Image (tube, coloured by chain):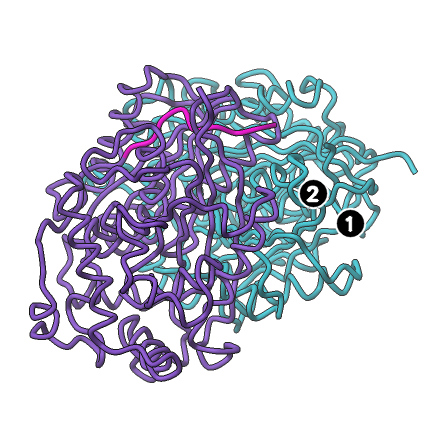
Chain colours: A cyan, B purple
Amino acid sequence: MSVYLAGATHTKFGKRPYSIVGLLLEAANEIIENTGITDFDEIYVGTQNPEEFTGEANIASQITDQLALTPTPAFRINTASSSGAAVLHIAYNAVAAGRAKRVLVLSAEKMTNLPTNRATKILAEVIDRSERAAGVSMASLAALITKFYMHKYHMHRDDLSLVALKNHSNGLLNPRAHLHKSITLADVNKSKIIAEPLRLYDCCPLSDGAAAVILTSSRTKVKIIGLGSATDHVPLRNREGLTSFSATVNAGERAYKMAGLSPKDITFAEIHDAFTPFEIIGSEDLGLFEKGEGWKALKNGVTQIDGGLPINPSGGLKSRGHPVGASGMAQVVELYWQMTGNAGKRQVLNPKIGLAQSIGGLATNNFVTILEAQNA
Amino acid sequence: MSVYLAGATHTKFGKRPYSIVGLLLEAANEIIENTGITDFDEIYVGTQNPEEFTGEANIASQITDQLALTPTPAFRINTASSSGAAVLHIAYNAVAAGRAKRVLVLSAEKMTNLPTNRATKILAEVIDRSERAAGVSMASLAALITKFYMHKYHMHRDDLSLVALKNHSNGLLNPRAHLHKSITLADVNKSKIIAEPLRLYDCCPLSDGAAAVILTSSRTKVKIIGLGSATDHVPLRNREGLTSFSATVNAGERAYKMAGLSPKDITFAEIHDAFTPFEIIGSEDLGLFEKGEGWKALKNGVTQIDGGLPINPSGGLKSRGHPVGASGMAQVVELYWQMTGNAGKRQVLNPKIGLAQSIGGLATNNFVTILEAQNA
């Protein structure tokens, strides 16, 4: 059975004075108001770690109760930082199997209530235990990957900065983005080193936020046509290489196969840029550009909003922000907004076939979702 | 598409010297060895709170990697203490939708590494925040429910003890149960008061353990014919009543409807007896006995292994133990063992149609699963 989006939205991302349940309620209430749909066969919630970030367990029951939607069945899904994408893939199955006609799919994370060093430590729990014991963090592993990429493909540090410049520029056009700040190459170069060669402006912020999507078996303007996900070895030392994420390659191949498409059919994309190099690597792993060519396409303006293949018109995780459990769904929300002509000043010219790619952990559980705008 | 069990098992429950990943590996390796099935379209893991119990996040990626099954897609599901059942319901959809032919479904919890008071505090996070602030625990809420039930249905304290006596007796016949101890009424009555009127022998132990099931679209000896789940208000004060769990009633009605059955068709059951009164209340909420009649059926021996409607032949959570994320699946494993004639000395006479009922949180997210033994 075909599965469509009846609506999609996300809250303003940023430092928000709401609890995780409050954030979920904000997103859910808005989508209910926007669509007029008030009853659901099932509710799904994607979130990475509300237990440690907020002390809240039992989140699926809690949000269902707070929405006055008991006794609706409810489930929580977790695949680390791809949870917001994973929960859509799981909810898709319920509709595709004919077991549900209409499901409310939510995702969220609340992170800014904790000191940054505590939040960073919780985030690092997704890393292999032995590598953690050696003292690595998500940023230091990303830095290692960046060095390999720069060396192998002769990318200059200033070329990498173009990801941040583009995404900050796009984020200025997104009223719901966390960071609204135009930056220059000089700003990047004088920003704090987080893990050499990565600087502050190469890293997405810690954010609070929630997203909501309604999936339905009834035809709407936006159809899910491709889904794929894949896992990879958790320890980096066991990977085949460090300049490509095989979990993205495999997830992409599965999604393209399901959609009956190839990379050249994609007209725009949202790519997981928790660290700036990940946007470039992702664009190559998805086959949108040849290996080693991603940074050149960026430099040539191809991935700008008005370029041939816009990437992260939303501002990406870099500027929209990264409430870890919500980001994978926020990407899909951006595709929906673009496809329904609701992207305002960041509207891409040809939002026909959009792809969202989400990374779980340090690329251990990645998701690709392909949507197609339906003809009126 | 119909969905069958190609295999099912669980580890020995108890205080185990394994990590949560080690426990999951033990269950997964055994089912792979038992069935000879080595490749899966997807992997699902149900667990309540490995982050706080063990410091391990990213559990779906980790177990997939440790099983040398990357890049297989993997997902983690959480609905508190019903996670082991919920993950089966979610995995069912993947097969029913035709998106997967064979999936490995795992569940586990590791709890005994923590001091009991710390583990109890983590477990209490599923309770409503305001009720938690008032100092309640799972046991004190269960005690309140017990008092209401005893008063309303004139059940004597000694009648309640019969749940523990029966389930400890059954557990003696289950080599994989946590507790192997025959107890008497006097033992119950002299055991420590946990929350009046509940004593130590009314409460399941904290346990380590894992369970595994393989779901398939190919016909086997055991078919899933009914699935249902439902949520309820998280705060107890908002419930309609305290002597029945509406989430069980609603989940049961949905599962019966899907199966095209009524309660009288059930030939044996596994019921969530984290606290002894829950077995009695569950048996009534599922329609197996009239309201207020559950304790009488127990007293009359109806629910014994050789009775007319055996309940918890495995020993239940009370004796098999309660690794919270695994229990909902261990119940289904027991149904499978009974239906395939592998229940040893605790074999029930007529394992034709088995029902498993699992409680998430304090009955905020409950699941009912009905299996049918297929004719040869």
Residue A85: numbered disc: none
Disc 1 to disc 2, how far (Cα)?
9 Å
Front residue of A295 and B225: B225
Q: Chain of mark 2?
A: A
Instruction: Judge left or right: residue B269 versus residue A295.
Output: left
> Which residue is painted at 71% across and 51% down in the image?
A8
Residue B151 position in % (x across, y down)? 35, 84
Mark 1 and mark 2, same subunit?
yes
- Where does label 2 land, which residue? A313
Q: Residue B4 magenta-drawn?
A: yes
For badge 2, the amino acid type reads Pro
- The C terminus of chain A, quarter of image: top right
Segment tinted magenta in the rendering: B1-9
Q: Amino acid at mark 1?
A: Ala
- Secondary element type, mark 1: loop
Question: For mark 1, what is the residue?
Answer: A343
Decide: marks 1, 2 in contact (CB < 8 A)?
Answer: yes
> Does residue A376 belong to the magenta stretch?
no
- Which residue is pictured at 15% across the width and 57% down the height? B114
Q: Residue at x 81, y 51 (%)?
A: A342
Query: With B1 as the anchor, is B78 left or right in this view?
Result: left
